[in-house]
Image: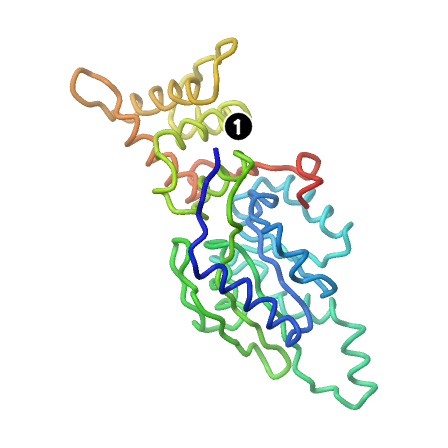
């Protein structure tokens, strides 16, 4: 699968990030805690080389807690500061300013020694579309300063947001990369809503997600859809075929039937994606550090 999703404004955004780097003291990269590899733009390391980095693992309320601990330790081992947050609910956001000042402690001491103790610290906020950048900024600022919507591609221009007398944030538009050559990356971004649903057939997407959850989190499916048990995966059965049978089982249990008693699997797929994104099925992490070392 080779998903193409690179609106023209993303080329402009990439150029703006490069131009603004000289105006900031640090970079904050916001990742989706459920997909820390897939939600990292591989261009960011090159674009922001040399700048101190704070990694925010957002949506930890929807991620597997044990996996989040492993990811936090992984990023700290690479020299990044790490903050775990649920920007929508506010958890962790009160610690943001302190995390930035701890990250920049040496620089702030140097400013103080030069008689510049009140100098404003500026941080660039980066992340892919719909990862929660604007929501985080609004929570940290304690007021609505950045536009938010639960769909990708809402922030379209940069804006400086003062947090307090000593801290300003630069909100930037979400930036993806020109294409997803790894199928799992494209699927993970689609599951979580980082790319628009019309990029992929919803039913196919639902089959892939069902197959993954059926293999890794079967108890969540049986509990969420009140199934006595899951259909067993047959030898050699691919993800789409197995996922389709799981969609049928869940849809039948929900009563999503059409003429002839067949299951409306497209409707079930849409429900699955909505419930996955809303955290109604449980807390899932789709990637682990040891699976994607080269990507992080």
**Identity of the residue drawn at 45% across and 28% down:** 208
**Identity of the residue drawn at 36% across and 24% down:** 247
The answer to which of 274 and 175 lies nearer the viewer is 175
**Identity of the residue drawn at 53% across and 23% down:** 215
The x and y percentages for residue 62 are: 51, 44
In the structure shown, which secondary structural element does the residue marked by tag 1 occupy? Answer: loop
Q: How is the image coloured?
A: rainbow
Vertical position of residue 7 compared to residue 259: above or below: below
Residue density around tag 1, few if under 14, some if 14–19, many if 20 or more, within 10 Å: some
210 relative position to 75: left or right:
left
The x and y percentages for residue 50 are: 74, 64
The x and y percentages for residue 115 are: 79, 90
Vertical position of residue 141 compared to residue 173: above or below: below
The answer to which of 101 and 31 lies nearer the viewer is 31
Vertical position of residue 288 compared to residue 54: above or below: above
Residue for badge 1:
217
Vertical position of residue 174 compared to residue 269: above or below: below
Asked where in the image residue 248 lies, by quadrant, the reply is top left
**Identity of the residue drawn at 55% across and 57% down:** 127
- Which residue occupies the extreme top position in the image? 235
Asked where in the image residue 255 lies, by quadrant, the reply is top left
The answer to which of 146 and 92 lies nearer the viewer is 146
How many numbered markers are drawn?
1
- Which residue occupies the extreme bottom position in the image? 115
The x and y percentages for residue 54 are: 67, 61
């Amino acid at each position: 699968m080779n998903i193409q999703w690179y609106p023209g404004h993303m080329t402009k955004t990439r150029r703006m990030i490069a131009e603004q780097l000289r105006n900031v003291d640090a970079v904050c990269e916001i990742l989706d805690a459920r997909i820390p590899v897939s939600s990292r733009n591989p261009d960011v390391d090159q674009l922001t080389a040399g700048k101190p980095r704070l990694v925010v693992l957002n949506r930890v309320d929807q991620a597997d807690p044990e996996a989040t601990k492993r990811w936090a330790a992984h990023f700290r081992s690479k020299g990044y500061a790490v903050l775990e947050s649920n920007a929508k609910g506010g958890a962790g956001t009160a610690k943001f300013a302190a995390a930035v000042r701890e990250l920049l402690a040496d620089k702030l001491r140097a400013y103080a020694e030069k008689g510049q103790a009140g100098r404003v610290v500026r941080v660039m906020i980066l992340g892919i579309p719909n990862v929660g950048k604007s929501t985080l900024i609004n929570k940290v600022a304690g007021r609505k300063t950045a536009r938010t919507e639960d769909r990708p591609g809402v922030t379209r221009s940069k804006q400086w947001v003062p947090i307090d007398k000593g801290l300003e944030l630069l909100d930037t538009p979400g930036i993806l990369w020109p294409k997803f050559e790894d199928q799992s990356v494209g699927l993970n971004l689609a599951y979580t809503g980082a790319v628009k649903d019309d990029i992929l057939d919803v039913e196919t997407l639902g089959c892939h997600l069902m197959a993954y959850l059926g293999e890794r989190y079967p108890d969540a499916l049986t509990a969420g859809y009140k199934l006595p048990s899951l259909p067993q995966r047959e030898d050699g059965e691919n993800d789409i075929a197995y996922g389709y049978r799981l969609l049928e089982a869940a849809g039948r249990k929900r009563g999503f039937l059409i003429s002839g008693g067949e299951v409306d699997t497209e409707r079930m797929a849409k429900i699955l994606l909505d419930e996955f994104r809303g955290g109604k099925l449980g807390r899932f992490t789709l990637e682990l550090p040891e699976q994607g070392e080269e990507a992080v």
